[in-house]
Image: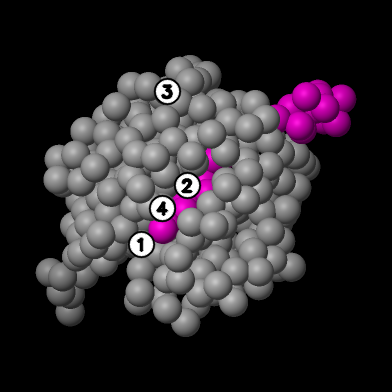
């Protein structure tokens, strides 16, 4: 017996092989095949974040884009940061936010530059007056098939974008986060099951996971909750920007569900962790992997 209300998770989203396509930099989602599903037509809100002001780093594509769309449909005003060169995707997100009757603000900022993350936060604060939901999601991922191919410049850049930007933003935000505010970081399963080809990316995410727990302990007495999300294989623009050491044709097909995840499948967790529904949850890192098990 089947129900018309049930959908097989194995085939709910794209489950075929990914066709070969050109590597790209900067990362522009709209040219991907298939285009990632960020909830543009499917996500429906329930006013879970009514009246919130959110700042999402890396919000133009992938997971950040899906979260930005979901937050707007849940009632939040949304500011996003994007890397210069990714304006087309950022403008798309801005239109989607404004279509929900919410305020939108987009910021071009390269977090490899010292002080850029703090400057971006200050701009959001000036635009919205308050910021009470931080989604720290920026990242770069370049696969290298040997230590001889991994430059120290890349290592530094990865930590600048992924880790040091978080420190800059949280330091700038601390005095502006009222009790009930939230911080959600994006880490990775690479934090727990690192791949040699992603050594700098994996170790940066290890730092993010540690920082997430540490920030939760620090902010608890201020009434600010801090949690993290650890995605597994999710089809985003990162994969086409030298993000895979080998062919990505079978990307995600080694999960228990036999496919890669789509960004929209993560958005409800970010909403939950930023809403009052998760009021007794802090210092957690929750994995979304399609069934790939994690070990510490």
Judge from the rendering whether residue 189 lies leftward or rightward of residue 210; answer left or right. Answer: left
Asked if the residue under mark 1 is in contact with the one under mark 4, i.e. CB atoms within 8 Å, the reply is no
Q: CA distance from mark 3 to mark 2?
A: 19 Å
Residue that mark 2 sits on: 234
What sort of colour scheme is used for the picture?
one colour
* Mark sitting earlier along the chain (4/2): 4
- The image quadrant where one finds the N terminus is bottom left
Q: Is residue 224 visible?
A: yes
Q: CA distance from mark 4 to mark 3?
A: 24 Å
Which of discs 2 and 1 lies nearer the camera? The answer is 1
* Mark sitting earlier along the chain (4/3): 3
Tell me the crowding category of disc 4: few under 14, some 14 to 19, or many 20 or more residues within 10 angstroms, Cα based: many
Q: Report the span colored magenta.
A: 132-157
Q: Is residue 101 above or below residue 86?
A: below
Residue that mark 4 sits on: 131
Q: Is residue 116 above or below residue 218?
A: above
* Mark sitting earlier along the chain (4/1): 4
* Mark sitting earlier along the chain (2/1): 2
Question: Residue furthest toward the bottom?
Answer: 280
């Amino acid at each position: 017996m089947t129900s018309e209300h049930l959908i097989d998770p194995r085939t709910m989203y794209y489950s075929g092989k990914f066709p070969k396509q050109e590597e790209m930099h900067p990362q522009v989602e709209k040219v991907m095949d298939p285009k990632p599903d960020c909830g543009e037509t499917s996500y429906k809100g329930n006013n879970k974040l009514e009246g919130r002001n959110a700042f999402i780093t890396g919000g133009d594509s992938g997971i950040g884009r899906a979260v930005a769309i979901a937050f707007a449909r849940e009632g939040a005003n949304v500011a996003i940061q994007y890397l210069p060169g990714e304006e087309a995707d950022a403008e798309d997100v801005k239109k989607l936010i404004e279509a929900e009757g919410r305020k939108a603000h987009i910021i071009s900022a390269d977090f490899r530059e010292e002080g850029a993350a703090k400057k971006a936060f200050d701009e959001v604060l000036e635009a919205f007056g308050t910021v009470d939901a931080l989604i720290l999601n920026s990242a770069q991922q370049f696969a290298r098939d040997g230590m001889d191919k991994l430059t120290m410049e890349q290592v530094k850049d990865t930590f600048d974008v992924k880790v040091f930007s978080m420190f800059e933003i949280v330091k700038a935000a601390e005095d502006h986060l009222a009790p009930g505010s939230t911080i959600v970081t994006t880490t990775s399963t690479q934090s727990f099951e690192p791949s040699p080809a992603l050594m700098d990316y994996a170790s940066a995410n290890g730092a993010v996971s540690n920082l997430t727990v540490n920030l939760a302990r620090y902010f608890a007495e201020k009434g600010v909750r801090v949690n993290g999300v650890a995605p597994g294989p999710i089809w985003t623009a990162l994969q086409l920007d030298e993000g895979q050491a080998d062919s990505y044709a079978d990307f995600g097909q080694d999960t228990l569900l036999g496919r890669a995840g789509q960004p929209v499948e993560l958005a409800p967790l970010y909403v939950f962790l930023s809403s009052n529904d998760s009021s007794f949850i802090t210092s957690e890192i929750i994995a979304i992997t399609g069934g790939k098990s994690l070990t510490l």
